[in-house]
Amino acid sequence: MSGAEPRPFCAAIDWGTTNMRLWLLGRKGTVIARRASGEGMRACMPDRFEAVMEAHLTAAGAPDDLPVIVSGMAGARGGWAEAPYLDAPADLRDLGRNALRVPSARRDVRILPGVCQRMAGREDVMRGEETQLAGAVAAGTVAGLFCLPGTHSKWARLEEGRLTGFTTFMTGELYALMRQHSILRDTLGEGDADPGHPAFGNAVDEMLSEGAVTAALFSLRAAALLSGTGAEELRARLSGLLLGSEIAAAVSQERPEEVQLVSAGGQAWLYETAFAAAGIASRTLDGAELVRRGLFDAACILWPERMAP
Amino acid sequence: MSGAEPRPFCAAIDWGTTNMRLWLLGRKGTVIARRASGEGMRACMPDRFEAVMEAHLTAAGAPDDLPVIVSGMAGARGGWAEAPYLDAPADLRDLGRNALRVPSARRDVRILPGVCQRMAGREDVMRGEETQLAGAVAAGTVAGLFCLPGTHSKWARLEEGRLTGFTTFMTGELYALMRQHSILRDTLGEGDADPGHPAFGNAVDEMLSEGAVTAALFSLRAAALLSGTGAEELRARLSGLLLGSEIAAAVSQERPEEVQLVSAGGQAWLYETAFAAAGIASRTLDGAELVRRGLFDAACILWPERMAP
């Protein structure tokens, strides 16, 4: 960091299972420096968290006394230090106040809590997504239905800045299991699913109107056997079935006016196309920006004295 | 075979993917000798089918000119010889007339066709189950909704001896994928699912009333994290979710008065318990007896001259 750059207010880390992102933020949340790496929770277990963080802070030119705010899987059991869950319904402006200070760390490091839902049969947990949602609240979207796709997609309902309930779908994992380990493996070939293929939207429609994904999966194998249907079409259909099934279940209670889609890149394109096929309006928000905003918002609550000029 | 035993009418083979069963049958369908082995289609590919069959026929004491009727995966592409599918709706009394004579075999060997369904998006195939269903028809059950559980469970509708439509559910395969390859793997531990556990019936109920299995799977992981729910309960719940989801989809169009369950042993116990939890009457039929009856029925059509006293 050159002397001309502003003095950072804090460092913020989004520490996931397989990746981590770090920002040095100014007093208004502006990005002074950024780092990204594959040193996620798994790569840092059990005891490399502090060393990895310090290396990235040094490379980013952070002062020795700069405090750090962290969200995500670093706060899980078996991670750096367990930050207990908040129970839903949870006020997303409370994340900072409930942060865990890492006792062993040399500098001031706080890990934000995840959120859990304890209702029997609807048990659920999130770590990281709550900070994205807090970022949306900080940016003014305090209510709505949010879709946060991934290996484990989360659907969350916000009311007046509170996370009132959420559901995790194993959509990404099911897609990977089908591709890698199921009887469909050879049938599906290599390559990504193309949401531009008509089979994608048709499969989404089918799930919205009927909804039994487990009754539809084997049709992929049968279509290949009977009609020689190509792998590209089958991958698009598989993806459409799984996303359609997720969306159908998520909107079954109440059809939303608009879904807030927290996603980017190819994944955003898949979900945007699926929402369009389902006739549901969606607005795409960038997850990296949201988590940075949520981390900054929590830091402002934790260290108000550092906000003074 | 001792001289006191009756001369067999034919040999009948149920040749699946991983197992094969062989019977020598008398003119009234009585069992004169039986063999079973793990030499299914996979073990016999590409060219061991005849040698395996002859070894079992010799061991069973079959005469050199005894004809053989075969059903199942031996007739698949890549199996012994491809027996083309009949198209649904298909008369199950027509299987024998549409059998393929294996051109290379020394003795008279006929492989029964499978049945396929070509409707776009509902493509499906079966090989072996159609012979079980033909056995049910031969035994007098010419109509009804049949459930044939397995790695790939089949649900079939019969009307006046005709197979009018069917759907395959990847229930058993999904259960195995969750147990072996998913994030739930460690959470689920070792051992079978116990349908006697209350979590099993509750999960079936849940799927019958709501139906989104992909929204429920992750709750197993969360329940273990949040409440320390034990592996035995989670296995019962997983099994109940998957069976419940299958049953809910299968009866969504029309609630049957009674389901004909083609199953035996622990698998029958799981499905019987699930049907009871769902408030659906079921009658259990033994699949091995049905397939033998179906094979015998087809043999009677193929070789009427051998029926003469």
Image: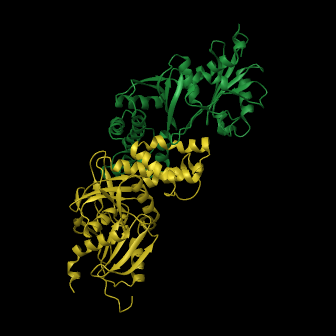
Chain colours: A green, B yellow
Q: Position of residue A142 (x, y in %)?
A: 51, 19
B67 or A250, nearer to the observer: A250
What is the quadrant of residue A202 in the picture? top left
Report the label total: 0
In the rendered image, the vertical position of residue B42 relative to residue A120, given as above or below: below
Q: Position of residue A232 (x, y in %)?
A: 39, 41
Q: In the visual, does B286 lie left or right of B202?
A: left
Q: Position of residue B219 (x, y in %)?
A: 53, 42
Q: Position of residue A63 (x, y in %)?
A: 76, 19
In the rendered image, the vertical position of residue A51 relative to residue A108, given as above or below: below
A285 or A96, nearer to the observer: A96
B180 or B113, nearer to the observer: B180
* Identity of the residue drawn at 52% across and 16% down: A140
* Residue A70 visible to an observer of this rendering: yes
* Residue B102 visible to an observer of this rendering: no
In the orientation shown, which residue stands out farthest toward the bottom?
B3
A203 or A1, nearer to the observer: A203
What is the quadrant of residue A128 in the picture? top right
What is the quadrant of residue B276 in the picture? bottom left
* Identity of the residue drawn at 35% across and 60% down: B282
Q: Which image quarter is the N terminus of chain A in?
A: top right
Q: Which image quarter is the C terminus of chain A in?
A: top right
Q: In the visual, does B284 lie left or right of A100?
A: left
